[in-house]
Structure formats: C-alpha cells, structure tokens
Image (cartoon, grey):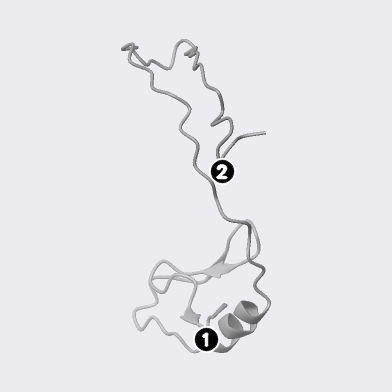
Amino acid sequence: TSKRNSLFDAKGRFHWTMNGVGLEFNHLFGFGVLDAGAMVALAKQWKTVPARYHCEAGTIKKMQKITNLEPIYMKIDTNACLNSDTQVN
C-alpha cells in the first residue's frame, strides 16, 4: 500500500534497500508514498474479527525481583469469569 514513485534524495545519501520480507525502504522516505487506491481496495476485502472479551484473572501482590538470570514463576487463582459473558472456556 505504498510506492516508491519518483521520490528523490538530491544529495544521494540514502539508497533504496530491500528488507527481509522483500519490501523496499529508504532511511529518508521510509516505505514511500501511501497508495490510497490500494488501501481502499484492501479495505473492501476487510474481514471483521469477533469482539474481544476481557476477563480479569487476578492480581499478584508479592514483590519479585526481575533479572535476566533466572525464570519467574507466578501462580494466579481464577475462576475464569465463570458464569459471565466473558467466561474463558
């Protein structure tokens, strides 16, 4: 949904490069000019996802030191919002 078009770096400092997924980018222009026509075409194909539900699982009140040297183990007791509209199955 973006195009390189005729974007020009007059000082020639930034070249177009292809990233790991095959998209061209430039450190001055990013991914280029937004293609509004392509965005509208994609929007017409949009598939809506189901509503997101929120179920509060609980709160951890014990202070824990977080380091990169050892794992953190937590236990949360919850009823998974049993008998509510947001029940987790």
Q: Position of residue 6 (x, y in %)?
A: 49, 89
Q: Nearest to the eye among marks 2 and 1: give it.
A: 2
Three-letter code for the amino acid on which mark 1 is drawn: Ala
Is there a contact, CB below 8 Å, between mark 2 and mark 1?
no
Q: Residues within 10 Å of mark 2 (few under 14, many from 20)?
A: few
Residue 20, placed above or below residue 1: above
On the image, numbered disc 2 is attached to which residue? 85
* Secondary structure beneath label 1: helix
Q: Which mark is residue 36?
A: 1
Three-letter code for the amino acid on which mark 2 is drawn: Asp
* Secondary structure beneath label 2: loop
Count of numbered tags: 2
Q: Position of residue 53 (x, y in %)?
A: 53, 46
Left/right of residue 37 with respect to residue 11 in the rendered view: right
Q: Position of residue 14 (x, y in %)?
A: 42, 70
- Tell me the quadrant of the picture where the N terminus can be found: bottom right
